[in-house]
Image (tube, rainbow, N blue to C red):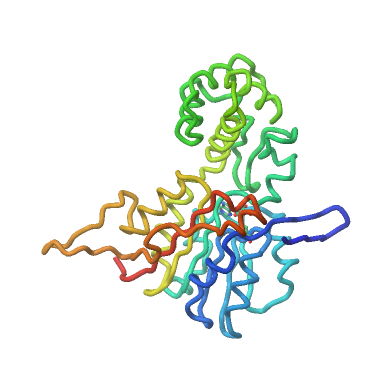
């Protein structure tokens, strides 16, 4: 758990997931250059730095100012550590060109931090009332309010169905349109609950919120982009470690780690030999232990995959 106080009221809490497993897999060269593309409060970053020697280097990226401030405060002054504010979907633009081809590993601990969820004014939580925002940082213009109040029925239904994986997407989209304008997270929750009844009601609420959050932040497109660009800027032998928290993310990671492209089909050369630029190192997914899940419920849906760059394409 990281607690950060930069002034009297600022507070940051997040417990890093699969901390030991992810950093052991990531850091193979203590003098290497690493990227933590989802810096958050810097929990993983601090552990990565502890595995590097004085020549190693870590670049932390986040699109959220609060996360960057928390990580800097948590790690303190360390000449091996630097931060960049930005969206990891633009990784190759964020990382200085002179480091392209020299990156030894990239960590992706996807999704939102506990801190972001807990801060009700960020609008991620359906447990507390807040504005319909859901932006992970202030770099994007689109908010949950615009999706909920301005999207057409078809677009809203698709967000709920494809990104939320919620079966009652049509009925929920209808109810949302009938209740417009919807201003807050609690109002949205009530509208969903007016459609979905029974013991799975809360799961549907969570799914709709997830769908809207993914759309607001363009999460799946950004994930595809960081995988492609990350592979290009890594050195041969460089590693990707990705921790995902829902099946849509995990599917994208799984395909890419298998084939180095988003179809999941390994390309073959003229002779029929497979020519994937990447090799998956985790034969299956790596999950947190029962013990970790008991201590940190946010870890319960985590799935980690590891892959190594084996050739340039
Ligand atoms: C699960 S938290 C990471 C927590 C971190 N590993 C730690 O130990 O504290 C995910 C972080 O990634 C950031 N993030 C998610 N998607 C991003 C993106 N596309 N670009 C930049 N940062 C992103 C979020 O703002 C959040 O701070």
The single residue placed furthest to the right in the displayed view is 8
Give the image location of residue 24, x and y in percent.
Answer: 52, 72
Q: Is residue 217 left or right of residue 220?
A: right
How many numbered dots are placed on residues in this image?
0
**Up-down: is 90 above or below 80?**
above
The single residue placed furthest to the front in the displayed view is 290
**Up-down: is 192 above or below 20?**
above
**Quadrant where ligand 1 appears:** bottom right
Give the image location of residue 67, x and y in percent.
Answer: 69, 57
Q: Is residue 277 left or right of residue 36?
A: left
Seen at 63% across and 70% down, the residue is 82
The quadrant of the image that shows the N terminus is: bottom right
Query: Based on the displayed image, in which of its 4 quarters is residue 74 positioned?
Result: bottom right
Give the image location of residue 5, x and y in percent.
Answer: 82, 60
Seen at 68% across and 38% down, the residue is 125
Nearer to us in this view, 8 or 288: 288
Query: Based on the displayed image, in which of its 4 quarters is residue 279 positioned?
Result: bottom left
Q: Is residue 147 visible?
A: no
**Up-down: is 215 above or below 157?**
below
The single residue placed furthest to the top in the displayed view is 178
Q: Is residue 256 visible?
A: yes
Seen at 58% across and 56% down, the residue is 290
**Up-down: is 275 above or below 201?**
below
Seen at 53% across and 35% down, the residue is 211
The quadrant of the image that shows the C terminus is: bottom left
Nearer to us in this view, 299 or 241: 299
Give the image location of residue 136, x and y in percent.
Answer: 63, 47
The single residue placed furthest to the left in the displayed view is 271
Query: Based on the displayed image, in which of its 4 quarters is residue 148 positioned?
Result: top right
Q: Is residue 32 left or right of residue 251?
A: right
């Amino acid at each position: 758990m990281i607690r950060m106080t930069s002034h009297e009221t600022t507070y940051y809490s997040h417990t890093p997931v699969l901390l030991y497993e992810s950093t052991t897999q990531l850091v193979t060269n203590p003098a290497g250059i690493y990227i933590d593309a989802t810096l958050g409060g810097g929990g993983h970053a601090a552990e990565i730095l502890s595995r590097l020697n004085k020549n190693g280097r870590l670049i932390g990226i986040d699109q959220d100012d609060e996360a960057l401030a928390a990580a800097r405060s948590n790690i303190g002054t360390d000449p091996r550590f630097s931060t960049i504010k930005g969206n990891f979907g633009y990784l190759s633009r964020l990382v200085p060109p002179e480091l392209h081809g020299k990156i030894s590993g990239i960590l992706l601990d996807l999704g939102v931090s506990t801190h972001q969820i807990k801060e009700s004014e960020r609008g991620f939580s359906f447990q507390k009332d807040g504005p319909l925002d859901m932006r992970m940082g202030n770099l994007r213009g689109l908010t949950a309010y615009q999706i909920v109040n301005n999207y057409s029925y078809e677009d809203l239904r698709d967000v709920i169905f494809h990104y939320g994986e919620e079966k009652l997407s049509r009925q929920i989209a209808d109810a949302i349109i009938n209740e417009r304008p919807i201003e807050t997270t609690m109002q949205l929750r009530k509208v969903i609950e007016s459609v979905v009844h029974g013991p799975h009601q809360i799961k549907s609420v969570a799914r709709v919120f997830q769908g809207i959050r993914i759309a607001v932040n363009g999460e799946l497109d950004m994930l595809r982009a960081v995988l492609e660009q990350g592979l290009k800027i890594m050195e041969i032998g460089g590693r990707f470690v990705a921790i995902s928290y829902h099946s849509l993310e995990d599917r994208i990671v799984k395909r890419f780690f298998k084939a180095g492209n988003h179809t999941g089909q390994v390309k073959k050369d003229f002779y029929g030999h497979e020519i994937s630029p990447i090799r998956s190192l985790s034969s299956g997914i790596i999950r947190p232990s029962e013990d970790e899940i008991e201590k940190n419920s946010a870890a319960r849906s985590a799935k980690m995959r590891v892959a190594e760059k084996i050739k340039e394409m």
